[in-house]
Image (tube, helix red, strand yellow):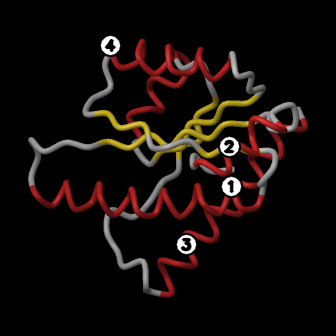
Amino acid sequence: MKWNKQDMINYLQAKEYVDTAILPLVPVTFEQEEEKQVSQAFQKEILDIMVHELEKEYKGRVLALPSYIYSSIDLEELARINRFTEGLNQMPFKHIFYITFDQMWKMKERDLNGILLWVPILKEGDIQQKDTQNMINDQIHQLKDLIKNYWNS
């Protein structure tokens, strides 16, 4: 289920079956060089595709949330995301997955109140290129397996 009106109506009617939330973590900074901004935008596009495919595969069990935008990862940001996660726990979700390309979250993983799915990615590319599409599909397949493993544990 996606974060839109109809899916939220469906979620509210069947929330006892929807036990997983997926929260994309997306960095947005304008203080860095232009190349970094382009790279972040590209990564967000790919992250959107991945989350869409995960939601489509597990529709009825997963709620894909809007992207969580941040500019830096500090103690204040960790507290903010954990407060957000507390709200998700009360909906209630049994599994909360954060998905990101930002490797800096790996160093903060133990401080998060959810499960971090860090995905390595190319810094640049073209979504229309076959190689890029194959890479995205491979990573989606790995994410599906990882999520299933968490569900089964």
Residue tagged by mark 2?
A: 63
Nearest to N terminus: mark 4 or mark 3: 4
Amino acid on which disc 3 is placed: Met
Does 24 appear above or below 73?
A: below
The residue drawn where x is 60% and y is 60% is 52
How far apart, in angstroms, are the residues tagged by discs 4 and 3? Answer: 34 Å
Would you name the residue on which mark 4 appears?
Answer: 76
**Which label belongs to residue 138?**
none
Label 1 neighbour load within 10 Å: few <14, some 14-19, many 20+: many
* Kind of residue at badge 4: Glu
Mark nearer the viewer, 3 or 2: 2
Spatial CA distance of label 1 from label 3 is 19 Å
x, y percent for residue 59: 77, 54
Of labels 4 and 3, the one closer to you: 4
Q: Which residue is mark 3?
A: 135
CA distance separating discs 2 and 4: 26 Å
- 73 with respect to 65 (left or right): left
